Image (cartoon, rainbow, N blue to C red):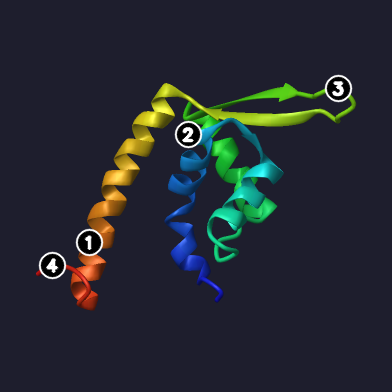
């Protein structure tokens, strides 16, 4: 099933911060982990992922560093900051409220 881009648009920041809260990752790794974790339903294309990462970095929510293992090419890793963890907590609460309200309207939640 393909998810409408408009639905994804409002969820990308919380999804990216959640991935980075688990461990530091490089861009392609984030994209593959998102796809794997969602059983292929959610995908993050480069044109979506990197502008969000750059904005999050500019805002101090994530920070980046270059790393390469022995025999590997250099990769830019991103990790969540304390400020980013605070934003993630806010976004999680916002998501719970939103999901609950949608479920109520659709008839799947408590009235």
Foreground disc of the pair 2, 3: 3
Q: Earlier in the sequence, mark 2 or mark 4?
A: 2
Say whether marks 4 and 1 touch (CB < 8 Å): no
Q: Secondary structure at mark 4?
A: loop
Residue 74 occupies quadrant: top right
Q: Which residue is mark 2?
A: 21
For the residue carrying disc 3, how many other residues have a C-alpha within 10 Å: few (<14), some (14-19), or many (20+)?
A: few
Q: CA distance from mark 2 to mark 3?
A: 25 Å
Residue 17 numbered mark, or none: none
Q: CA distance from mark 4 to mark 1?
A: 8 Å
Image height of 6 relative to 50, above or below:
below
Q: Which residue is mark 1?
A: 100
How many marks are shown on the rendered structure?
Answer: 4
Q: Residue at x 46, y 41 (%)?
A: 18
Q: Which residue is mark 3?
A: 70
Q: Earlier in the sequence, mark 4 or mark 1?
A: 1
Q: Earlier in the sequence, mark 3 or mark 1?
A: 3
Q: Which residue is mark 4?
A: 110
Image height of 12 relative to 3, above or below:
above
Q: Residue at x 52, y 67 (%)?
A: 5
Is 65 displayed left or right of 108 in the figure?
right
Q: Residue at x 53, y 59 (%)?
A: 38
Residue 45 image offset from top left, x and y in percent? 66, 56
């Amino acid at each position: 099933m393909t998810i409408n881009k408009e639905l994804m648009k409002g969820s990308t920041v919380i999804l990216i911060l959640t991935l980075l809260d688990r461990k530091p990752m490089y861009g392609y790794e984030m994209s593959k982990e998102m796809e794997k974790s969602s059983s292929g339903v959610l995908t993050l294309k480069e044109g979506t992922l990197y502008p969000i990462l750059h904005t999050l970095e500019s805002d101090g929510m994530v920070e980046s560093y270059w790393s390469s293992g022995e025999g590997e090419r250099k990769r830019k890793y991103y990790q969540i900051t304390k400020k980013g963890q605070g934003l993630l907590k806010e976004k999680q609460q916002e998501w719970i409220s939103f999901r609950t309200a949608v479920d109520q309207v659709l008839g799947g939640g408590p009235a």
